[in-house]
Amino acid sequence: MNSSPDFSKGLLPAVIQDASTLQVLMLGYMNEEAYFKTQAENIVTFYSRSKERLWTKGETSGNFFHVKNILLDCDQDTLLIQVDPVGPACHTGADTCFNTSNQDNAAWLDYLKHIIRSRKGASADTSYTASLFQKGTNKVAQKVGEEAVELVIEAMSNNDELFKGEAADLVFHLLVLLEDRGIGLEEIVKLLQQRHAK
């Protein structure tokens, strides 16, 4: 984050978002001390208006928010904190403080896309993904074909677990192929949106 929050305005709202699902989990407030503690420990700490003290989310429940990213809005007076939550966000036991589900994890594909991208220039011996990139486009495309055939075969059986495993393999290898070709997942989503609008 290039700019610094403007705490001259008092407590700043901190929107907490699941980094994987992109669901908004809750809204809290931070003073400067809570902000710096959050940055230093990579665990979200708020300033509790009711307790009138710093309050680390999860200090009694164990349901911590592990910080993945901190973003600041254009006026430097609102924070968006992307987290990896441990357990439910709300003290009631709900996934979020807005009583919404945090189980829609399709957005995690975008997170996976970034992991795949980070392996593109890595040494082949560091990961399976890096080794695929090193083998070139033809090999990656061949893997997509192999996984598609295996998915079709499993679709004709009655074993849902094997079918899901092959579907996951196909999606993963397709993401690798897209990255190899320099085409972002968002471009495919945009194309699907355009088709849906017709």
Image (cartoon, grey):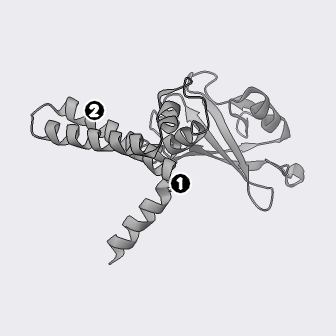
The residue beneath circle 1 is 182
Above or below — where is 115 with respect to 15? above
Q: Image quarter for residue 55?
A: top right
Q: How many residues crowd mark 2 within 10 Å: few (<14), some (14–19), many (20+)?
A: few
In the image, which is nearer the foreground, mark 1 or mark 2? 1
Residue 163 visible in the shown view: yes
* Amino acid type, residue under disc 2 in the picture: Gly
Q: Image quarter for residue 19?
A: top right
- How far across and how far down the image is residue 155, in percent? 14, 40
- How far across and how far down the image is residue 189, in percent? 43, 60
The residue beneath circle 2 is 165
State which quarter of the image contains the C terminus.
bottom left
Report helix, strand or loop for mark 2: helix
Residue positioned 64% across, 23% down in the render:
59
The numbered mark at residue 148 is none
**53 and 38: which is toward the camera:** 38
The image shows a total of numbered marks equal to: 2
Above or below — where is 155 with respect to 41? below
Residue 20 visible in the shown view: no
Above or below — where is 83 with respect to 14? above
* Amino acid type, residue under disc 1 in the picture: Gly
Q: Residue furthest left?
A: 157
Of mark 1 and mark 2, the one earlier in the sequence is 2
Cα–Cα span, label 1 and label 2: 26 Å
Q: Residue furthest bottom?
A: 198
Residue positioned 49% across, 33% down in the render:
129
Tag 1 and tag 2, C-beta contact below 8 Å: no
